[in-house]
């Protein structure tokens, strides 16, 4: 079964949508559109009755909700209808050693529970929180922002790679279609998350020879799916991202 992302011009490049229950890496530099991509994906699911969750590991959920509410995605309405949830798992304020987990409920109350883990959150602690939320609210679509926040929690590169790979494999057991946002700045970095994910979409953000800012999208990998490989321009509209024609280089 194909899961539509709702991003205009994108689903047609991947045989109609993402494969249900799989994990996809959305990577790129700051400002390239990763958060917007994730918000559109969740809002599209909520529109057809699929509950979605946005898991924030660095930015505050208040800021994300405020920014994404500027698009015509009905974010606030879906929160009220219990079709969109935000989970904040990140460092506490200065002076605290403990993390807190905070769920923004449909009536905008904040439910806070203390966690024994020390910041930054580990892949295991994040999975525990996500698993609990998926079961409690019947989550079908999941966005984790960002994988980079839990990538560097080990001082040993081999352990770090194994921990991230294990985290992505365990996400499959939740049955959600998942977007993993990442601040990778090179599509040819060949990290464990690229190998472990079922698909990789790279969002480019660079200056051309004329000094103009260029934003583009490129599908690097998509298991079980015939897909377009061209670098295509993208633009930000009042409904979010829109994929355009291939960029001539």
Image: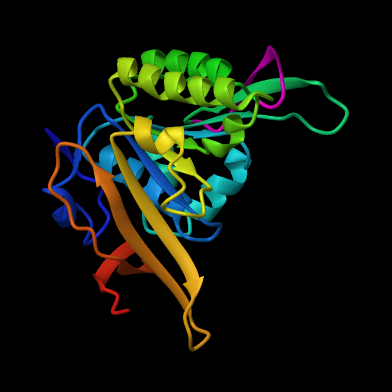
Where is residue 111? Give x, y as percent: 61, 21
Quadrant of the image containing the C terminus: bottom left
From where the camera sits, is residue 44 visible?
A: yes
Q: Is residue 80 left or right of residue 4?
A: right
Q: In this rendering, is residue 123 above or below 229? A: above
Q: Is residue 244 left or right of residue 62?
A: left
Query: Observer-nearest residue: 111 or 197?
Result: 197
Where is residue 174? Give x, y as percent: 33, 17
Where is residue 79? Give x, y as percent: 43, 36
Where is residue 154? Give x, y as percent: 65, 23
Residue at 40 percent of width and 25 percent of height: 168
From where the camera sits, is residue 238 visible?
A: no
Q: Main secondary structure of the magenta part?
A: strand
Q: In this rendering, is residue 212 above or below 229? A: below
Magenta stretch holds residue 13: no
Q: Which residues are magenta?
A: 107-120
Q: Residue furthest right?
A: 95
Q: Residue furthest top?
A: 116
Quadrant of the image containing the N terminus: top left
Number of marks drawn: 0
Residue at 39 percent of width and 38 percent of height: 194
Query: Observer-nearest residue: 130 or 225?
Result: 225
Residue at 28 percent of width and 34 percent of height: 198
């Amino acid at each position: 079964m194909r899961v539509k992302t709702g991003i205009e011009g994108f689903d047609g490049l991947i045989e109609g949508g993402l494969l249900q229950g799989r994990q996809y890496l959305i990577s790129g530099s700051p400002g390239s559109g990763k958060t917007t991509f994730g918000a559109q994906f969740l809002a599209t699911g909520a529109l057809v009755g699929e509950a979605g969750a946005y898991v924030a590991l660095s930015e505050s959920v208040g800021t994300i909700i405020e920014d994404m509410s500027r698009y015509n995605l009905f974010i606030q309405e879906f929160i009220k209808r219990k079709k969109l949830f935000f989970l904040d798992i990140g460092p506490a304020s200065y002076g605290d050693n403990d993390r807190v987990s905070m769920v923004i409920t449909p009536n905008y109350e904040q439910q806070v529970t203390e966690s024994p883990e020390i910041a930054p959150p580990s892949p295991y602690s994040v999975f525990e929180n996500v698993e609990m939320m998926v079961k409690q609210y019947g989550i079908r679509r999941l966005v984790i922002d960002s994988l980079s926040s839990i990538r560097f929690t080990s001082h040993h590169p081999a352990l770090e790679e194994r921990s991230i790979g294990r985290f992505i494999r365990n996400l499959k057991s939740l049955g959600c279609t998942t977007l993993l946002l990442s601040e990778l700045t090179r599509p040819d970095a060949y990290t464990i998350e690229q190998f472990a994910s079922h698909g990789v979409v790279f969002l480019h953000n660079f200056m051309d020879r004329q000094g103009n800012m260029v934003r583009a999208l490129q599908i690097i990998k998509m298991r079980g799916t015939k897909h377009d490989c061209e670098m295509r321009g993208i633009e930000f509209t009042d409904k979010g991202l829109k994929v355009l024609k291939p960029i001539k280089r």
